[in-house]
Image: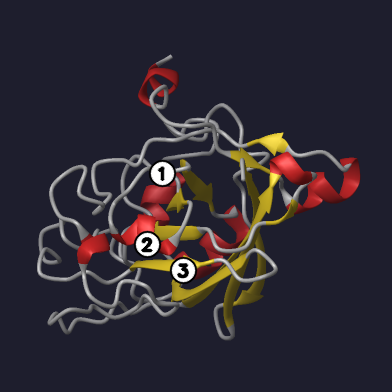
Amino acid sequence: MLRLLAGASLLPFLGCSSDAAGQSGQCARIPEETAGPYPGDGSNGPNALALSGIVRSDIRSSIAGATGVATGVPLTLTLTLVNVAASCAPLAGAAVYVWHCDALGRYSLYSSGATGQNWLRGVQQSDASGRVTFASIFPGCYPGRWPHIHVEVYPTAAAATASGARLATTQIALPQASCDEVYATGGYTGSAANLAQISLATDSVFSDGVTYELASATGSVAAGYGMTLTVGVQG
C-alpha cells in the first residue's frame, strides 16, 4: 500500500522483459518504484541533472569540477526502451537517468565520504533502436536493500536535464549469481555479509516480484559484466 501511494502521482511505467516479450508477445507493466532518498534529481536536495556533462555514457567519473572516479568490477548496463502504445516498437529519443551506489554502498552527493562527488549518475538518450548504454561499475550491497540500479525515464534529454516531468521511476534488481561472484572479490567490503541478510522476497522494493525488473547478466569478474533489460513506456 505504501508503494502504491508513493507512486500515485507518477504516470505508469510499463515494461517488457526480454524473455516475457519474446515468449508471450505481450508487454507487461513494470512496477513503479520509489526514487529513494538519494535521487540527485532536485527532488531531495542536490540536482545532478543540472550539471554540465551529465549527458554521458561513461558514468564512472565525477564531472563539473569534481575529480573522483568510482572503482569496482566493470559493468555495462544496456536498456532498450519500447513503446507499449505501438506494440512495443523501439522508442527513440527518450532519455534515461540512472544512478546507483558505489562498491562501498555510498551514493554520490549524499553519503559520508562521497558528498563532493557526482559519479555513478548520468543521462543517455535512446537511439533509433530504443537503446541506452552506460559504462559503470557493479554496485555494492548496503544493509537492508537488494543490489539495484535506479532509473528515471523522461520524454527527451532536454526534459531530463531540466528536471522536467518524468514518464517513469523504477529500480532494476541485479541477479544473485553475479552479486555473489563480485562480492567475493576485493573492494566490496561488507557487501557479501549484507547480501546474506537480505533476499528478493524480503526486500522492501522487490518483495512483490521482480519478473519485469530483474536484469539479465553476462560476463565475469575478470571480463566485466553486462546487464540488460527491455522496458516499455507509454510513448
Residue under label 2, please give it: 158
Which residue is at the front of the view, 171 or 57? 57
Q: Are marks 2 and 3 in contact (CB under 8 Å)?
A: no
Question: Real-space Cα distance between discs 2 and 1?
Answer: 12 Å
Secondary structure under tag 1 reads: loop
Most distant residue in the top direction: 1
Which residue is at the front of the view, 121 or 153? 153
Disc 1 marks a residue whose amino acid type is Arg
Residue 103: image tag: none
Question: Real-space Cα distance between discs 2 and 3?
Answer: 11 Å
In the rendered image, residue 92, in percent from the top left (x then y), is placed at 62, 63
Badge 1, how many Cα within 10 Å: few under 14, some, many 20+?
Answer: some
Residue 124: image tag: 3
Q: Choose mark 2 or mark 3, whichever is in front.
A: 2
Badge 3, how many Cα within 10 Å: few under 14, some, many 20+?
Answer: many
Secondary structure under tag 3 reads: strand
In the rendered image, residue 158, in percent from the top left (x then y), is placed at 37, 62
Question: Real-space Cα distance between discs 3 and 1?
Answer: 14 Å
Residue under label 1, please give it: 166
Q: Earlier in the sequence, mark 3 or mark 1?
A: 3
In the rendered image, residue 154, in percent from the top left (x then y), is placed at 45, 51
In the rendered image, residue 70, in percent from the top left (x then y), is placed at 29, 77
Residue shown at the point (53%, 61%) measured from the top left: 180
